[in-house]
Amino acid sequence: MERSLRARPPTLVGLFVALVLPGALTASVGDRALRGNAVTTELASNITIWCFTLLLLAIVVFWERRAFSSIGLVRPTWSAFLAGCVAGAGLIVLSVAAGAAITALGMPLGNKPQTGLLVGLPFWLQAFVVVGAGFTEEILFRGYAIERVIELSGSRWFGMLVPVLVFGAFHVPFWGVAHAAVVSIAGLWLSLVYLWRRNLWTNIIAHTLADGLILAALNATALGNRG
């Protein structure tokens, strides 16, 4: 407890970096990406998220004076990779089911301008977005946020739900409420995976795999519609 109290000021700053700054960035650049140069805006946005992530890692090491293992960044293993593949497959199934359920409730997921922007990006930038989301969002919203909120609150459930709600909310400005609901469900799954393994590499692999396959499906659908 004494260590937790001493760590509280840098941890609060770290939580601000992890939970608040990404949402502020998304709210500020979403419409700009639709109205202006999508490639430039998306590239700048993703580089900024990486900067937030590197800042957070610096806070962990130099201010909190803790190891990366304190946020689940441990040595990658084959078991983490295999668990990530399984969790990624589960994430895809869950996301599709959640999307179907939410659509059936009268909340369509048809964000055509947003989806068109994403599939219209060059392949190299799509890859950068997918890999970047897998790394940065899992470090920010899972590894760091879950561990530190648990430490400050003393509750595993509170530590899991706060990042999930924030993670979903920061998707609302650009993607809309229906998509944010699916993202929240996906975030809940990834949070459970993290609490199960306490190994962020499992989450990174699951997130990257799911996003990559979903984006590949969107690209294939877009090509089929053009044909």
Image (tube, grey):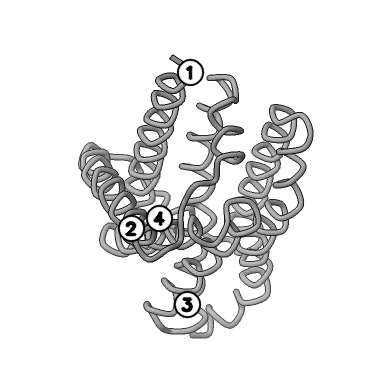
Q: Quadrant of residue 227?
A: top left
Q: Regarding mark 1 in the picture, which secondary structure is present there?
A: helix
Q: Amino acid at mark 4?
A: Gly
141 sits left or right of 91 in the view: right
Lower sequence index among marks 4 and 1: 4
Which residue is denoted by mark 1 in the rendering? 226
Q: Nearer the viewer, mark 2 or mark 3?
A: 2
Q: Are marks 4 and 3 in contact (CB under 8 Å)?
A: no
Q: Regarding mark 4 in the picture, which secondary structure is present there?
A: loop
Q: Nearer the viewer, mark 2 or mark 1?
A: 1
Which residue is denoted by mark 3 in the rendering? 151
The image's mark for residue 72 is 4
Q: Quadrant of residue 78?
A: top left
Q: CA distance from mark 4 to mark 3?
A: 14 Å
Q: Amino acid at mark 2?
A: Ala
Report the residue at 70% width, 42% height from top. Answer: 48
Label 1: how many residues lie within 10 Å, few (<14), some (14-19) or many (20+)? few
Q: Nearer the viewer, mark 1 or mark 3?
A: 1
Lower sequence index among marks 2 and 1: 2
Lower sequence index among marks 4 and 3: 4
Q: Regarding mark 3 in the picture, which secondary structure is present there?
A: helix
Which residue is denoted by mark 2 in the rendering? 98
Q: CA distance from mark 1 to mark 3?
A: 51 Å
Label 4: how many residues lie within 10 Å, few (<14), some (14-19) or many (20+)? many
